[in-house]
Image (cartoon, grey):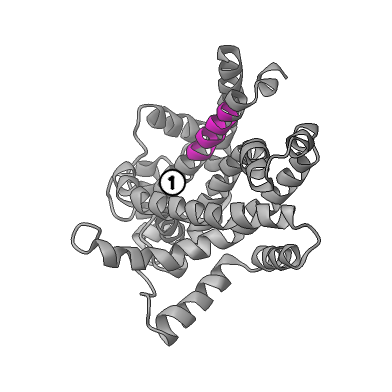
Amino acid sequence: MLAFTLRRLAQAIPVVFLSTVAVFLLLHLVPGDPALAIAGSDAREDTLAAIRHDMGLDQPLPVQYLRWIGRVVQGDLGRSYTTRLSVAEQISLRIPATLELSLAGLAIALLISIPTGVLAAIKERSVADWVVSSFNACAIAIPNFWFGILMILLFALALGWLPASGRGDYVREPLKAWTYLLLPALTLALNQAAVLSRFVKSSVLEVLHDDYVRTARAKGLRERLVIQRHVLANALVPVATVLGIQFGRLLGGAIVVESVFAWPGVGRLILQSIGSRDYSTVQGVLLLLVLVFVIVNLLTDLTYGLLDPRIRLS
């Protein structure tokens, strides 16, 4: 297991390095001048030149990258060009909201996907299988932002059951705070639930035809116990790998959902920063998302290797 862990860590290092290069170059390819955004369109050229010099934008790109990555390694993500606040401070204020939304979305996706995936597998080619497959196809086809708007129109505006935007205070009004979370979490979970449900169905179908399942049935074990003890225990192991990838997709999807519901997370922060050409904040948030994605995938690989020794040997 130690060799497997070290091998996975070694594979993650070049991924992180290339990601930092991509994040840095991508933002510098975006049209627009951050100095102009800060000083205004009527600013004099010497003022713009002074701002570019202060920000280091008049240096060659390799120099700018080395200066940026040098500060990042020391834990300094820079300072926002627009708010003049520390980027790390801005992220630390927003990241709890994004994690709360992503984890709630993942929990809802699991609650929907595992029962429906198992049901579709054990009732293959039945009405239940057709209903689940149709729901999954529709859920994958519907964009997050469109479903979110539908949820707002129905549950917030038409019925008035849930708030349309914002985030509640769990200290002062814990019960009311959950009502703020429900609609964005459902919106975020819909697509992921459909993808996971399909994967669970495929995994369960594969296990259902294995010899040890047929042996358990031949020994007279009840079907419910066969599913619980033999099928689910083995079929859900590969799902652990997919969960890591899906969590990364949830973080990406949260950017859109946070904008629709005015949720105060890092997704909304990055969109606001892109609009104001705030390179430091955008770079900091993108780097954070990349690191979270790499760490989650690393932990997923290690968990998979722990559950299935064949992965470690391969």
Q: Residue furthest left?
A: 172
Residue 17 visible in the current orientation: no
Residue closest to the eye, 41 or 159: 159
**Residue underneath mark 1:** 285
Work out which quarter of the rendered image holds the N terminus and state it.
top right
Left or right placement of residue 233 versus residue 155 in this view:
right
Compared to residue 231, the image places residue 187 above or below, namely below
Asked whether 300 falls inside the magenta stretch, the response is yes
The three-letter amino acid code for the residue at tag 1 is Val
Magenta extent: 291-303
* In-front residue for pair 110/275: 110
Identify whether 226 is placed above or below 308: below
What secondary structure predominates along the stretch shown in magenta? helix
* SS under mark 1: helix
Quadrant housing the C terminus: top right
Q: Is residue 145 above or below residue 79?
A: below
x, y percentage for residue 284?
Answer: 42, 43
Q: Position of residue 280 (x, y in %)?
A: 40, 46
**Frontmost residue, 143 versus 83:** 143
Q: Quadrant of residue 35?
A: bottom left
Q: Is residue 188 magenta?
A: no
Numbered circles on residues, count: 1
Q: Where's residue 160, x and y in %?
A: 37, 83
- Does any portion of residue 260 appear in the rendered image? yes
Which residue is situated farthest in the front direction here? Answer: 220
Rendered residue at 31%/45% (across/down): 92
Horizontal side of residue 204 vs 2, given as left or right: right
Name the side, left or right, on which 312 lies relative to 254: right
